[in-house]
Image: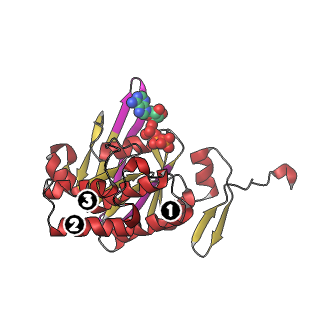
Amino acid sequence: MITIDGITKRYGSTTVVDRVSLEIPRGGVVSLIGANGAGKSTLLSMVGRLLAPDGGRVLLDGVDVLATPSAELSCRLSILRQENHLPIRLTVRELVEFGRYPHCKGRLQEDDHRQVDLAIEHLELGTFAGRRLDQLSGGQRQRAYIAMVLAQDTDFVLLDEPLNNLDLRHAAQSMETIRSMAEQLDKTVVVVLHDVNVAAHHSDRVIAMKDGQVIADGAPAEVVTEAVLRKVYDLDVPVAHVDAGPVALHFARMASPAAE
Ligand SMILES: Nc1ncnc2c1ncn2[C@@H]1O[C@H](COP(=O)(O)OP(=O)(O)OP(=O)(O)O)[C@@H](O)[C@H]1O
């Protein structure tokens, strides 16, 4: 369970995450949606202890992340950031092996190699395994980063816009991989997504942020509604309902009352 208790972040006089409290139980996919600048990445970074909060705390299974030794934390929690600062000259395999570092401290055993191979296979990176990151397309590189997180095999997984640069098929496949991490391996995945339809379709719960606060939190059908989307994005977005759930038709314009 992730417990976020009144967490706050300020830059100067601006509060960018404002006393957010959330309980995220073990297992499942939780999506964070919201406009640019809403505070999603800041919140995720504080949960992952990459950024110090100005107030509040984050507990993993009841233990404060600030009190957890780094070596232990990286075996329990992984985070994929929007920007990665890993050397671009690594090969895909070396990058994915990096994910095993918290477990094996650089001396990969049979099980570590197996996890690396599995992650490479899941993200369809076999043909690129020996290629350097700077020799890949943006989407191939993004899949390599997801594979690294998959290989890290932690109970808690935080992903900030993992679908950046991914084409339709690889986006769908990556979300399937993320879902199976939650369903089959009982991992708790918190993922920032810009596509509300992907969020609605693949999540157990959708949390919408605006101006540093949570303004909606619930099952996809409760959050992906015209009223909530208007509040979150200041935009009128029609929402259709199909068997798979709500679908925001963000490319369509809402009929204005005057036109009817
Ligand atoms: N180092 C910083 N100094 C000052 N302000 C910052 C800093 N980092 C982030 N911010 C501000 O904090 C707010 C929240 O940023 P954050 O990156 O969390 O938003 P986000 O919801 O993830 O946005 P996006 O969808 O664009 O990635 C923004 O207004 C941003 O400009």
Amino acid type at circle 1 is: Ala
Amino acid type at circle 3 is: Gln
Q: Nearer the viewer, residue 100 or 79?
A: 100
Ligand 1 has an atom within 8 Å of the beta carbon of the residue at disc 2? no
Mark 3 or mark 2: which is in front?
2
Ligand 1 has an atom within 8 Å of the beta carbon of the residue at disc 3? no
Q: Position of residue 79 (x, y in %)?
A: 32, 51
- Quadrant for the C terminus, please: bottom right
Q: Which mark is residue 113?
A: 2
* Gap between marks 2 and 1 measured at Cα: 25 Å
Specify the segment rendered in magenta: 8-33
Residue 87 in view: yes
Q: Which residue was labeled with disc 1?
A: 171
Dot 3: element: helix
Is residue 18 in the magenta section?
A: yes
Residue 100 lies in quadrant: bottom left
* Gap between marks 3 and 1 measured at Cα: 20 Å
Q: Main secondary structure of the magenta part?
A: strand
Rendered-image quarter of ligand 1 = top left
Q: Position of residue 35 (x, y in %)?
A: 54, 44
Dot 1: element: helix
Q: Residues within 10 Å of mark 3 (few under 14, many from 20)?
A: many
Q: Which residue was labeled with disc 3?
A: 152
Q: Residues within 10 Å of mark 1 (few under 14, many from 20)?
A: some
